[in-house]
Image: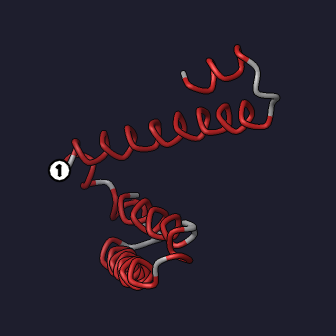
Amino acid sequence: AMSKSAVKISSDLLSNPLCEQDPAFLEMVTAFDTAMKRMDSFNQEKVGAGDPGGLLPFPSVFPSLNVAVKRREQTLQDYRRLQAKVEKYEEKERTGPVLAKLHQ
């Protein structure tokens, strides 16, 4: 799950508009994306993608990792929910209450 999350982060960075504006940033993000995909491929090969039995020891060995992944997923869901709210308020007419909520 951690390497899948890293691949997701790297692909999200690649879709960032800053990549279009700054070639050096695009080069760094592309290298990061390649590294994360290689890491994920390596992890899938070593752990066993279709073998749930191969995954069982890891939650007991690295309990904080499982908690961190769950916390990241929850934070990501919260961020997406709040981002949708911001976009909704940005589309509305700029009145006092709307600006106050947008600022909040």
Position above or below: 94 against 72? above
In which quadrant is the N terminus drawn?
Answer: bottom left
Q: Residue 100: image x %, image y %?
A: 62, 18
Position above or below: 36 against 73? below
Three-letter code for the amino acid on which mark 1 is drawn: Val
Which residue in the rendered view is the most extreme toward the left? Answer: 61
Q: Residue 60: image x %, image y %?
A: 22, 46
Tell me how the rendering is colored.
secondary structure
With 95 as the anchor, is 102 left or right in this view? left
Identify the element where label 1 is drawn. Answer: helix
Total tally of numbered discs in the picture: 1
Going 53% across and 76% down the picture, which residue do you hit? Answer: 21
Going 54% across and 21% down the picture, which residue do you hit? Answer: 104
Q: Residue 77: image x %, image y %?
A: 54, 38
Going 72% across and 36% down the picture, which residue do you hit? Answer: 90
Q: Nearer the viewer, residue 8 or 102?
A: 102
Q: Residue 30: image x %, image y %?
A: 43, 82
Q: Which residue is mark 1?
A: 61
Which residue in the rendered view is the most extreme toward the right? Answer: 93
Position above or below: 68 against 24? above
With 21 as the anchor, is 25 left or right in this view? left
> Residue 46 falls in which quadrant of the image?
bottom left
> Residue 51 falls in which quadrant of the image?
bottom left
Q: Nearer the viewer, residue 44 or 34?
A: 34
Q: Nearer the viewer, residue 28 or 44?
A: 28
With 44 as the anchor, is 18 left or right in this view? right
Going 17% across and 50% down the picture, which residue do you hit? Answer: 61
